[in-house]
């Protein structure tokens, strides 16, 4: 008899975003004329940069010409893309990262989940609370947790609250943890990590033989020049951190699909016999065996992000969304609603008015304002009473959504 | 201290194709002028069909237009592609498969590996020998095997030899196995499975509560009308089989990346408490959590395979490669070399002349003829003494390679 992976049965009813989609669909079915504005899922709305589109059209044309046709590419990505990334995203900021340490993939979501393949089953795992749900769910699936309690917290995970009470800082735990997920600029709170904060984490990880999974998917949205864009700006991080990056948010690739993960060759973890094993070799083997690389066409599109035109066009996109974030922050604050984030990240983290629960505020916002956001409690127990509003939308929709919310919730 | 997944350390030195690449690179470095012809890795060489390229260019243009821009798509793939597949590849052959049972992915290699996520760790697993190495390596990584012996066979796996002695048929095992990998038309041997043979497997699986992983990546190359293209042409297969399909070989998508996996909603496996759990739900949850869908642009390219032009153009591609296969078969046979396969698959499976080992023949072919093939022993112990020659190349290269081989190895 074939048997299933029983750990899947521990997962709570649904991944957050499908549940939101379900409620919105039900509402839309009952109110087919409601002018719904979606500021929920962090999905971009503006056209792909011209430089990326032109590069992809040239790449499609390559595929029609036997001399330039591309079959299987390197599972790790093409050298021209890995090189462009190493130069522009890391070496230009003084980070000692080589092209060969960059693994191109079809998404950071995929990578953060798949990376668990190369780690053992008995690591102590820390996540922030609130947290991007994929970090938790993939650990549940891999059997690294116990059951969930009534608040949705899984046994065996170490939760590090990031709330207004601690200025949205992931405090160093008193106990030893082996794998730590940090996402800065933070999804969902929009908080950032200072250089001192990341230095403390790197020091902790090096002292304890821990590995930091650093998700920098939103680094392009940093406006404060003192905030690090990469964990490799911290000395010693090459020995204790893996970094995730994506073209989804800076260049609008959520539907085009390209991301990358940095695994320094100096990074090791322990085998059962106590020896140190290079994680680069394991991840390289994992990707060679279970992945076949990203579409040549898409990689050419990603490469164009680093052209002068691509850089100008992605900056314009980021600036556009950050202007939306500013409008959201300012309008809500003027209406007396407490807001956080939104200055170095495309998310505004809202304290729900009148102590509404996150889902009650979700339902109210949907019913009264026809605006979709994301309930903070969907990101973890410590997100209860908060609400995430995404800056990814047209200016018109952002203005209209703010008009409706401020009229309804003026306090 | 972070620890690794020690099962990775059981893996043999290298995945087959990287090892071939290493030897070819070393040879090319020593002989920079050698006119190497590559018939090793099963990679296509001819341009992508015009219909697919036109569709992808239109899709890139959609991405430049706010009204048609696509962000995150469904993790399972777009309905228009799932629907086209269900209609053309399954319902047209009488297979009762619905669009919702089709999961679009970036590769069958990825899917065959990732699918293990949803199964338990104590299933008894059967593979053919020779076998596509990914099936074995992903089970080693997942901890489903013991160590390898000197022949490269892993403890705990059930190997089903497919050799000339049994007419390249995967015999039903006498013992009970839970998960069975079958690939027909077969990579590497080029053998096919008859309807009676697949019926026997379906009956076995249903009687034993086993699940068949049916890899039909090469179904487009079937020329014999009596050979099934899908396992769902066998009655009862909906209750015991998952099927893998790809656009890599029929439409030349090895560098473009699109595939799909069929998980019928009627398929179940056992939870620890003895209850039946729908595998569709688990795979849907896995994909929603650890995958973000295939690029919109690429999915539009795949959809075009099903247009009248796309159908004609992919048929022309398949016919072209199968004419290559015919030339390889006939030339080698005329030179007195024993050949198998190559009539319903783009691979010719060669008995090495003079009882050379597979790798000795590889080295000889590379050194003497400057032709790259794939050593049969790289696919498993029972592949020793065999050699795979791929029909994926230009006519000119195939003719030239055959000229060189037949001159050198005439027996």
Image: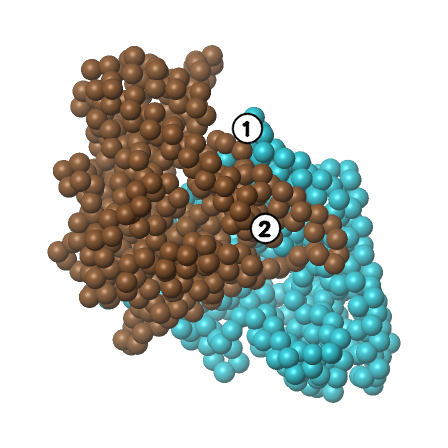
Chain colours: A cyan, B brown
Q: Please report, as a chain letter, where disc 1 is located.
A: A
**Relative depth, front residue between B22 and B37:** B37
Residue A180 in the figure: left or right of residue B56: left
Q: Please report, as a chain letter, where disc 2 is located.
A: B
Q: CA distance from mark 2 to mark 1?
A: 22 Å
Q: Disc 2 on helix, strand or loop? A: helix
Residue B373 in the figure: left or right of residue A206: left
Q: Quadrant of the N terminus of chain A?
A: bottom left
Q: Quadrant of residue B331?
A: top left
Name the residue furthest right. Answer: A334
Q: Is residue B110 visible?
A: yes
Q: Residues within 10 Å of mark 2 (few under 14, many from 20)?
A: many
**What count of labels does the image hold?**
2
Q: Quadrant of the C terminus of chain A?
A: bottom right
In the image, what residue occupies the spot 27% across and 32% down?
B349
In the image, what residue occupies the spot 70% across and 43% down?
A52
Residue at label 1?
A66
Q: Are marks 2 and 1 in contact (CB under 8 Å)?
A: no
Residue A289: image location, x then y, percent = 41, 44
Position of residue A237 relative to residue A325, above or below, is above
Residue A152: image location, x then y, percent = 51, 77
Position of residue B279 relative to residue B15, above or below, is below
Position of residue A40 relative to residue A360, above or below, is above
Residue at label 2?
B300
Label placed on residue A364: none
Q: Residues within 10 Å of mark 1 (few under 14, many from 20)?
A: few
Q: Is residue A103 visible?
A: no
In the image, what residue occupies the spot 64% across and 55% down?
A254
Residue A243: image location, x then y, percent = 58, 50
In the image, what residue occupies the spot 30% across and 76% down?
B275
């Amino acid at each position: 008899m074939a048997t299933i992976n029983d750990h899947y049965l521990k997962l709570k009813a649904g991944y957050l975003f499908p549940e939101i989609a379900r409620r919105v669909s039900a509402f839309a079915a009952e109110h087919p004329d409601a002018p719904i504005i979606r500021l929920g899922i962090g999905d971009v709305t503006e056209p792909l940069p011209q430089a990326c589109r032109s590069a992809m059209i040239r790449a499609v044309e390559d595929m029609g010409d036997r001399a330039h046709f591309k079959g299987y590419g390197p599972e790790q990505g093409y050298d021209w893309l890995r090189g462009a990334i190493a130069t522009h995203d890391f070496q230009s900021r003084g980070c000692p990262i080589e092209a060969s340490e960059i693994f191109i993939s079809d998404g950071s979501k995929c990578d953060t989940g798949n990376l668990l393949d190369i780690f053992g089953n008995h690591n102590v795992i820390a996540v922030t609370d609130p947290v991007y749900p994929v970090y938790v769910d993939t650990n549940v699936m891999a059997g690294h947790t116990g059951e969930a309690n009534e608040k949705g917290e899984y046994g065996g995970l170490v939760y590090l609250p990031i709330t207004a009470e601690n200025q949205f800082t992931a405090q160093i735990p008193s106990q030893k943890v082996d794998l730590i997920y940090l996402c800065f600029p933070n999804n969902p709170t929009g908080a950032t990590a200072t250089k001192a904060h990341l230095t403390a984490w790197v020091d902790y990880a090096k002292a304890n033989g821990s590995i930091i999974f650093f998700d920098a998917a939103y680094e392009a949205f940093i406006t404060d020049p003192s905030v690090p864009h990469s964990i490799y700006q911290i000395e010693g991080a090459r020995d204790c951190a893996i970094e995730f990056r994506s073209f989804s948010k800076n260049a609008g690739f959520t539907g085009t699909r390209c991301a990358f993960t940095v695994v320094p060759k100096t990074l090791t973890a322990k085998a059962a016999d106590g020896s140190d094993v290079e994680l680069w070799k394991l991840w390289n083997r994992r990707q060679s065996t279970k992945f076949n690389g990203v579409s040549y066409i898409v990689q050419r599109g990603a490469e164009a992000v680093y052209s002068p035109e691509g850089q100008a066009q992605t900056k314009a996109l980021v600036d556009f969304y950050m202007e939306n974030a500013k409008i959201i922050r300012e309008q809500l604050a003027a209406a007396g609603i407490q807001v956080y984030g939104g200055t170095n990240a495309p998310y505004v983290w809202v304290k729900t008015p009148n102590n509404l629960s996150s889902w009650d505020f979700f339902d109210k916002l949907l019913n009264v304002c026809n605006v979709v956001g994301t309930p903070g409690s969907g990101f973890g127990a410590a997100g209860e009473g908060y609400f995430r509003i995404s800056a990814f939308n047209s200016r018109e929709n952002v203005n209209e959504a703010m008009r409706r919310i401020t009229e309804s919730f003026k306090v």
